[in-house]
Amino acid sequence: MTSMAVASLLAGLDATSVSTAMPSIIYDLGTSQGYMWIANAYLLTTAAFTPIFGQTANIFGRRALTLFAIIIFAIGSAIAGPAPSLGALVAGRAIQGIGCGGINAMVEMVVCDLVPLRERGKFMGFIFAIYAISTTIGPIVGGAFASRATWRWIFYLNLPLTGLTLVMVLVSLSALPSGSSMSIRSLKRVDFSGNVLLVAAITSILLALTWGGGEHPWSSWRTILPLVLGLLGLPLFLLYETRVPEPTTPLRLFSNRTSLVGLWCAFLHNMLVFWILFILPIYFQAVMRFSAFRSGISILPTAAVCMPFTIVSGGIMTKIGRYRPLLMAGFVLFPVALGLFTKLDQNSTTGYWTSTQVIGAVAIGVIIPVTLPTILTPLPESDVAVATATWAFMRGFGTIWGVAIPLAIFNSKVDSLAAVRLSDNWEARTELSNGGAYTLAAGGFLYPVLGLEDDPDLEATIKSIYVDSLKLCWQVGLGFALLGFLLTFVAKELHMRTELETEFGLENELSKKKDVPPAA
């Protein structure tokens, strides 16, 4: 279990550490053109390649796929660290994303194989707490390396960590069955065509979301065409999966309403997590004038509170054998937090934005260990691998939308407000339009580029544009949080198994206990 926690730490830290180092990366590589792909390539491959790990883990075994994911992650880090150009860095990040998607899926898969369904909550709570901490301190680590040494150490640090993780996994998972050997017959069982369809669809969607409102207007065919093709590609992928003997994503996972709710709640949960983590730094850096490093420090309340509530939520679920009350509790608190975030402005106190983060962090922590058991409870143990990989995919897909939707809303609102409030200041309006407002805030260039230190009136106007644009982002996020709350009423409360029905299980007393009566 410790090796799985370390692997989760590795994936979580890398997911967010680049954000605060972005200005240094742009300066060092000498280009800002296409810099968003440093993050987007990682998000794309993390989401798109996750499902294939579920299918191949059933063919080649958990241990082999876990080791493979860690090695791929290390290769990506080795490419990204010394990258001489933006293209090389993006390539390294894309390879890292494949490894990260595999790590995320395999960690939960191994946990599910080792302990019965009802007992998984407390173990998942611990591992998710580690992941939550690592994703939150990632920006601090990235900012520290960028300001005190070099951003390249963000990737160099991964190499000894992956080495340690490999050794731990080799030792701790040595007893697991190895699965089928690498042969032509085994490879023919892999759904390569389905995965190509899925990767193409996700890539097309991400291209549209990246270009829209920035490089191209949302009304441009260059934005609309890839978005439509990507959205059509997803149902085409599912249709194709009905015709494959061993599909990557079996449609039976969506055949019951409880698993379906769990999958969509996982999507909404991760979307809202990254919605918050994406918008708050813009608020801190543009409105409150915090440095990137201080902005990272200011998000610490999210990690500090999320961690214990993740562990507590998992423990409660194990104790009571019920997941629905915890799912509902989390999605009750999410709208409260997002509603309070809509009131953030330049006059908000530290106490206000800290306490609001605390409420959001409780919601995040309570939900984290609950969505996967919600999905798995109605399904047989034979579906654990593909269901876990699909759950990981939905989380990764939610991450993409959790960044893309608020960015699109923010850019669009800034453009409309700047056209009115900066009608007599062409230079400032041009700098903020077409995605410039986000780039300037995220890169820490807003105040020097626009000369706001010497013009308090312009500073007040710019801040008002940021505040009102971010307010709309929070309001839309509130709508998604309410949707999640409504979905929790659709899920059924089913009996969580206390018997372990898998060849990978640990021999312990937990699996020998008699089943408790079904939850009401």
Image (tube, rainbow, N blue to C red):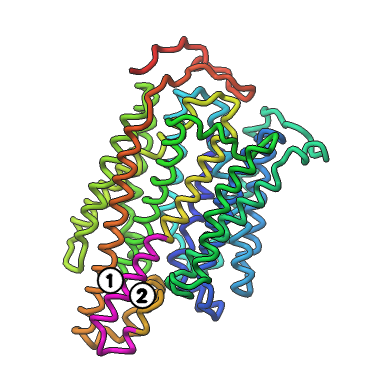
Q: Is residue 82 above or below residue 391?
A: below
Helix, strand or loop at label 1? It is helix
Q: Is residue 455 magenta?
A: no
**362 sits left or right of 204 in the view:** left
Towards the viewer: 480 or 88: 480
Q: Can you identify the residue that label 2 sits on?
A: 437
- The tag on residue 466 is 1
Question: Relative to the observer, which residue lies in front, 50 or 102?
Answer: 50
Q: Nearer the viewer, residue 299 or 488?
A: 488
Disc 2 residue type (three-letter): Ala
Residue 505 locus on image (x, y percent): 59, 23
Read off the magenta span. Answer: 405-429
Q: Does the magenta portion include 406?
A: yes
User: Where residue 348 sits in the image (x, y, percent)?
Assistant: 18, 63
- Look at label 1 and name its amino acid: Tyr
Which quadrant does the C terminus fall into?
A: top left
Task: Write the residue at 45% across / 60% down.
Answer: 141
Left or right: 441 with respect to 33?
left
Disc 2, disc 1: CB below 8 Å? Answer: yes
Q: Position of residue 355 (x, y in %)?
A: 22, 51
Circle 2 sits in a helix, a strand or a loop, which is it? helix
Which residue in the rendered view is the most extreme toward the right? 184
Main secondary structure of the magenta stretch: helix
Q: Up-down: is 405 above or below 519?
A: below
Q: Residues within 10 Å of mark 1 (few under 14, many from 20)?
A: many
**Residue 330: numbered disc:** none
Looking at the picture, how far across and down is residue 511, in whole percent?
52, 16
- Residue closer to the observer: 399 or 64: 399
Task: Work out how far the residue at label 2 is from the one at label 1, CA to CA, in angstroms.
Answer: 8 Å
